[in-house]
Amino acid sequence: MANDAAPSSKHLPTFTGKTSGMTIDGVKMNGATYSDWRYKLQGKARSQGENIWLYMTSDPGAPENLSEEEKKKFDGFLTIITDSLSDGALQVVKLIREQNPQKVLAALDAAFFNQSVLSRVSAITDLINVKQKVGESVDAFVSAKKSICREQLGSKISIEELMMGAVIAGCLDDYADLVSTATASSDAVQVTEDDLDNLLDKLRTKENRLKDAPRKEVEIQNAKALTAEAIQTAMSAALKEHGVKKSNNKPKKTPKKNTPKKKGPRCYNCKEYGHMKANCPNKGNSGPKK
């Protein structure tokens, strides 16, 4: 058997099928991603001969048949693949009951490679947004970018996915509620042009709402001001009218009839007003003047 190139280990990193490298509920899932596992399988196969990998992936450039030596190496990849799988990933292989590495890889691709549509769009935003950290070397920074391209994007990236990721990465925070739910469902094979058009339609609708918001707020405030003014005017009119009615309903005082005006004390001698009997100028008279 020819000497292996990188990776040098006979076995690949274990892929369980439970981890895809996506961030779930804010937690980055640990473990080998499928794209990482597949990339290392590719390196392993190519170290045995370029035709082996092309044949395993049904590449259009692959030969129709392998040589006897290549066929022997190709068949050996069934063990290499199954030894590096566990849990859900291994269950996929068991269910198809295939001994052909080509069909086993196709089943794994269908089950796990296409599941990362969401993660690919997320990876594009990371590719655009992630900045070099303070103290991080250029090589480390570039290596992280290459890792995203290789392990999360691979050869599955499409123009629509690239466009959607770029739009999501560049949108203002005002559109966060839309872009967080705009990506394709986890069972989709890829982001389509319709998916992109739907996202753009939603963004345009939200944009128009945001433009209308200040005008509507002014209209609401004006309506509130007019309503308050109308209420105040109505209350003032009601209070004024109530005051007039109240003043009109007060009973008027009428003077008593035949009530003589008081002219001072009355004299018991002459019966005149204005002096007392002791001071009466007519003491000789016992009655009023005739």
Image (spheres, helix red, strand yellow):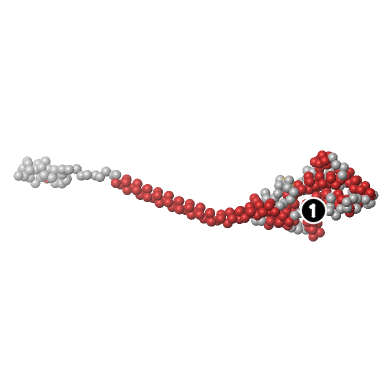
Tag 1's secondary structure?
Answer: loop
Residue 122 seen: no
Q: Position of residue 93 (x, y in %)?
A: 83, 41
Q: Is residue 256 left or right of residue 207?
A: left
Amino acid found under the numbered disc labelled 1: Gly
Q: Position of residue 198 (x, y in %)?
A: 66, 52
Residue labelled with disc 1: 154
Residue 147 versus residue 265: which sits nearer the camera? 147
Q: Is residue 102 left or right of residue 247?
A: right
What residue is shown at x 68% (from left), y 52% (from top)?
194
Mark 1, Cα crowd under 10 Å, few <14 / some 14-19 / many 20+, is: some
The image quarter in which residue 147 lies? bottom right
Q: Position of residue 139 (x, y in %)?
A: 81, 59
Residue 95 seen: yes
Residue 110 versus residue 125: which sits nearer the camera? 110
Q: How many marks?
A: 1
What residue is shown at x 83% (from left), y 46% (from top)?
105
Q: Is residue 237 left or right of residue 253?
A: right
What residue is shown at x 5% (from left), y 42% (from top)?
285
Which residue is at the far left?
290
Residue 157 versus residue 263: which sits nearer the camera? 157
Q: Is residue 225 left or right of residue 133?
A: left
What residue is shown at x 94% (from left), y 49% (from top)?
68
Q: Position of residue 189 (x, y in %)?
A: 75, 49
Which residue is at the far front?
64
Looking at the rendering, in which quadrant would you find the C terminus? top left
